[in-house]
Amino acid sequence: MNLKPLSPPDPAAVADWMAALPGGAIELRDDRIKHRWTVLIESFLLSRYPVTQALYFSVTGEVPGTFSGGRKPVETVSWLDAVRFCNRLSEQTGLRPCYSFGSEGADVRFDGAADGYRLPTEAEWEYACKAGTKDSRYGDLDRIAWYKGNSGGTTHDVGLKEPNAWGLYDMLGNVWEWCTDVYDETVYGSYRIFRGGGWCDEERGCLATNRRRSHPSSFKIDDLGFRIARNRIG
């Protein structure tokens, strides 16, 4: 897979990053409120890797983060940074952006029918991570993920660990990944969800079912990045 910077992003090259995933259903749970619910998933596209520093730079001209390396996942990006990246990538590749913004970047609205790049929903993310299984991990942790026990205190180039059954790499470990969804507006306001565990997490932090949340514009940390999704058209 070609991970060198794309300048400007080549639609065909970016599309080559995307895996076509089948439709299905996933049961989610919120242990905080002891609630379970089932979500139907339509077939969609998801990037095989987290967005790298090289791809992020090719779209935005910026390289945020603590750790340096074009093939390493971009990190220290807020949820707003991630969705603005998705919009810019959509515009640069001739697609309709999925997000629109109110004054000063507030009041973000999501167009689920747009054909552009977006963050996955948390249901899509967990469904993709499990790849047709019911397990909380898709393999032995040391073989599939960078976490506290093997990371050496840093992120690593994407794609070095074993993928899941659908060809997706680094779904667990390396960096947590932002999702589109609001966590619980009545309790946490605009806080958004992230999933997957990162390079500094213990084993228990790297599970397909773990849910975390934080502020969409102010929360940035060195083990939190994102991957991109698209609706499957036609």
Image: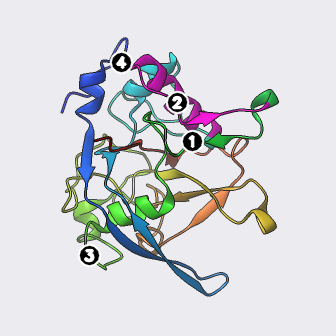
- Quarter-of-image position of residue 140: bottom left
What residue is rendered at 69% in x and 46% in y? 216
Residue receiving disc 2: 97
Asked if residue 148 can be seen in this view, the reply is no
Q: How is the image coloured?
A: rainbow
- Spatial CA span between label 2 and label 3: 32 Å
- Spatial CA span between label 4 and label 2: 15 Å
- Spatial CA span between label 4 and label 3: 34 Å
Q: Amino acid at mark 2?
A: Pro
Q: Amino acid at mark 3?
A: Thr
What residue is rendered at 38% in x and 52% in y? 152
Is 66 within the magenta? no
What residue is rendered at 27% in x and 32% in y? 15
What range of the chain is rendered magenta?
80-102
* Among the two numbered marks 4 and 2 on one chain, the one whose residue lies closer to the N terminus: 4
Residue 225 position, x and y percent, is: 49, 44
**For the residue labelled by badge 3, is the local secondary structure a helix, a strand or a loop?**
loop
Residue 16 position, x and y percent, is: 22, 33
Residue receiving disc 4: 9
* Among the two numbered marks 2 and 3 on one chain, the one whose residue lies closer to the N terminus: 2
Residue receiving disc 1: 111
* Among the two numbered marks 4 and 3 on one chain, the one whose residue lies closer to the N terminus: 4
Asked if residue 158 can be seen in this view, the reply is yes
Residue receiving disc 3: 133
* Among the two numbered marks 1 and 3 on one chain, the one whose residue lies closer to the N terminus: 1
What residue is rendered at 28% in x and 41% in y? 234
Cβ–Cβ under 8 Å for marks 1 and 2: yes
With respect to residue 233, does 135 lie above or below? below
With respect to residue 120, does 17 lie above or below? above
